[in-house]
Amino acid sequence: MTDLRRGDPTGLHRVLDPAGVLPQAAHRLDTRAELWPDEVRVRVERLNLDAASYRQLERTHTVDGAVDGDAVRQAVLDIVAARGKMQNPVTGSGGMLVGTVEEVGPDSPLGLRVGDRVATLVSLTLTPLVIEDALARWDGRGEQVPCDGYAVLFGRSIAAVLPDDLPAELSLSVMDVCGAPALTARVVAEHAARDGRAPTVTVIGGAGKSGSLSLAAARRAGAGRTIGVVPHQGEAGLLTQAGLADEVVIADARDPIALRDAVAAAGGPADVTVVCVDVPGCEGGAVLATADRGTVVFFSMATSFSAAALGAEGLAADVTMLVGNGYLPGHAAYALDLIREHAGVRGLFERRLEVSA
Amino acid sequence: MTDLRRGDPTGLHRVLDPAGVLPQAAHRLDTRAELWPDEVRVRVERLNLDAASYRQLERTHTVDGAVDGDAVRQAVLDIVAARGKMQNPVTGSGGMLVGTVEEVGPDSPLGLRVGDRVATLVSLTLTPLVIEDALARWDGRGEQVPCDGYAVLFGRSIAAVLPDDLPAELSLSVMDVCGAPALTARVVAEHAARDGRAPTVTVIGGAGKSGSLSLAAARRAGAGRTIGVVPHQGEAGLLTQAGLADEVVIADARDPIALRDAVAAAGGPADVTVVCVDVPGCEGGAVLATADRGTVVFFSMATSFSAAALGAEGLAADVTMLVGNGYLPGHAAYALDLIREHAGVRGLFERRLEVSA
C-alpha cells in the first residue's frame, strides 16, 4: 500500500485529480516546491515542447495565415497553471525540459547532485511544473521555450546530465528521441540471434530524428540490408548523403500497397520495420511491408492501437507489433554515442537545428 | 504493382472510397457477388457483432431505460447498406460471421470447398457483406444476428471450418478470441527459453473469454505461477472453481497502484502480463504490475497507444509492450484444443452462452 506521507516512486502522492491515477493520466498535479524524500527539484531554463503539441497550438492560434505568438504563449501558461504540468489537452503530449538541479531529497535514487545541468527524459505530461517568469523571453514561436521556474522529478523519473563534449541543443535533440534507437538495436539483435542471419531492416521516416538514429542503431546491432523510406526527393537526397541506409526509397507510408511494393523492390519485405513518421494511417503499410514472423516497432504517437491490431488480423499477418517504449536503460548514452560516432546522423541533426534556429 | 483485374490478396480491388486504402480503413467496399479469381463467397447464416459495437448501438437506441430493438436493427442495416461491410463508425469494430461456402474462385489459397460450414476469422470491418433478408429474424437484441445474405473472402482472409465434435455456438465463441491464447503461448514460451525458468504470468480479466483461454494457454506453454485478476467476488468464485489460476486476485485494473500491489501480494510482479479487459485506462497498472524486462500483451481494443507508450516511459519501466495481433497460424485449432482439454475453460464458456441465450 502507498503511504502518502512517504510518497510513491511513481509520483502518485502529487496527483490531485482524479485520485488514484498516475501523474501522466492526472488532470492536475500538486506543484508545491517542498520535496518528498525521494524527489529532486530542478530550476528550469528551457522547455522543449513536443512537436505534435506545438503544431496543434500553432494551428489553433493562426489567424489569416499568421501565427499569433502571444496567444500561443498564453495557451501554454494557461495549461500549466490549470494542470500543474505541460500536457496539451488535445494531443495529450508534452515534451521535455532542461535545467539545473537545485535540491535533492535524501532518498532520491537518481544519482543527481545540486548544480548538475540535466535534461528530463520523462515526459512533461507527468512532471510537476511551475512557470515563474510568465515566459517573458518567448515569442510563442517554435518548440524551444526559454523559461524560468521549477519542476519536480520522482523516484522513478529519469534525467540525464548533459555531456560536456556536445552542444546542449544537439544533446537535447538527441535525447528527445533516444528510446527509438535503443529499442531498435534490441529488436534487431534479438532477430539476428533467433534467425541466425543478419535481418533486413526498414525504417519509415529514415531521414528524421528518431529515424536516422534508428538506422544507425540497426546497422550497429547487426542489421544486414537497411532500407530508409522517405516521403519525397528532398529527404531522399539528405538520407543518401548521410550514408545511413543501403537503399533509400520514396513512398507515401499511408498508402499500404505502394509502401509494400516499394520496400519489396528495395530488397524487402523487412524482418524488422521501424515506424518513425508522425502521421496517422501507417499501420497497414508497415504490416504489409514486413516479412512473416517479422517485427514492427511503432514509435509514432499517431499510431492507432485498433488499426494496428485489426489491420494485422485482417491481413492474416503473423507479425509481432511493439508499442515503442521510450525508455530502456542506458538509452540516452547509447544515442549520444551514435551521434559521436556517425557524422551522417550528426549532420542531419545539426541541419535540423540550423533550420529551426 | 496491383492489377485490379487480377485483384490483390488484401482485397484492395474492392475498395471504393477512399482509393488506395486497405479494406479495413475504407469507408465503402464493392459488394458485387461476382468473384475475383482468388476470392470465396459465403452464404451468411449469422453475424456475431463485436461486443463493444453492440453495446454502443444498444446505448444509442435506449429510450427511458428500454432498448429499442427495431432501431438497433435498422442501424445495422443502414451501416451495412452504406459501407458494404459491418463496421460500427463509432467504435470502429465489427465482429465475425458464420455461413456456408457457395463459390470458390479458381485461385483461392484458402483451401475451402463448396458446402463447408465456416466461421470467418477476419473482422467484419473488412469483409464485403450484403444483407438480403432485412434481418427479419432478429429482434435487435444481443450480439448474435440471424441473417441471410452473402459475404466475400479475399486471398489473405482467414476462415475456419467448424469442427464436428463441438457445438457451433461454442466453437464460434472460442474462435472469436483465439488470437489471445495463441500469442500468450508464444510469449510465455519465449520468456521461458530466454530466462531459463518458468515465467510468472498475470492475466487481467482472467475469468473472461480471452482471459480464461490465455490462462490455460500460459500453463500449457510452460508458465510457473499464474495469477488471474478479476474485478469482483462473483468472477473470483467462477475463476477459482474453473481451476485455471494459482492465485485469484480481486482488483480494479484501472487503479494502477492497487493493481501493482495486489499482483505483488499474489507473488508478482509478473514476467508476462496479458490484458484482456475491455475497459480504458489499464495501461499504467499493467506496466507497473510487470517485472523489469517483462512483457505486457494488450488484447483489449480499449488500449490507448499513447497511454501505453508514454506511461511506460514515465515510469522508467523496461517492459516490452505488444499490440495483441488477432492472427497467428493455427490459432483457431489451438484454442479449440484448449477447450476440448480443459473442462474449466469450457465450463466458463458454456456458462456465458447460457447467460446470453
Image (cartoon, coloured by chain):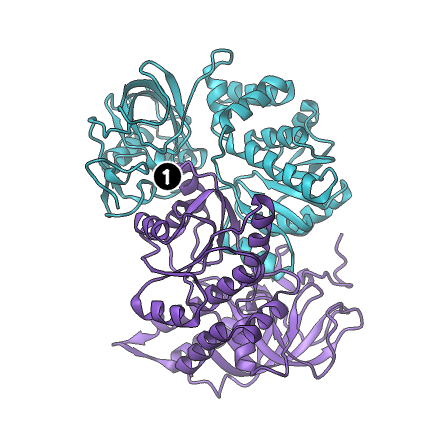
Chain colours: A purple, B cyan
Residue, x 66% and y 62% (percent of image)?
A329
Residue at the limit of the structure toward the bottom, as seen here: A137
Residue, x 58% and y 82% (percent of image)?
A166
Q: What is the x, y in percent for residue B336?
A: 54, 21
Residue A59 drawn above or below residue B137: below
Q: Specify few, some or many for label 1: CA neighbours under 10 Å numbering under 14, 14-19, or 20 or more.
A: some
Q: Nearer the viewer, residue A55 or A328?
A: A328
The mark tally for this picture is: 1
Q: Nearer the viewer, residue B232 or A138?
A: A138
- Residue A141 makes an appearance in the image: no
Q: Nearer the viewer, residue A334 or A225?
A: A225
Residue, x 51% and y 14% (percent of image)?
B166
Q: What is the x, y in percent for residue B22?
A: 31, 43
Residue B105 drawn above or below residue B11: above
Q: What is the x, y in percent for residue B345?
A: 61, 23
Horizontal arrangement in the rendering, residue A276 relative to residue B287 (left or right): left
Horizontal arrangement in the rendering, residue A353 relative to residue B339 (left or right): left
Q: What is the x, y in percent for residue B184?
A: 59, 36
From the image, tell me which residue sits under label 1. Answer: B60
SS label for mark 1: helix
Q: Quadrant of residue A10?
A: bottom right
Residue B273 drawn above or below residue B113: below
Residue B181 drawn above or below residue B284: above
Q: Nearer the viewer, residue B321 or A224?
A: A224
Residue, x 71% and y 61% (percent of image)?
A9
Horizontal arrangement in the rendering, residue A153 relative to residue A339 (left or right): right
The residue type indicated by label 1 comes to: Thr
Chain under numbered label 1: B
Residue at the limit of the structure toward the top, as seen here: B165
- Residue A126 makes an appearance in the image: yes
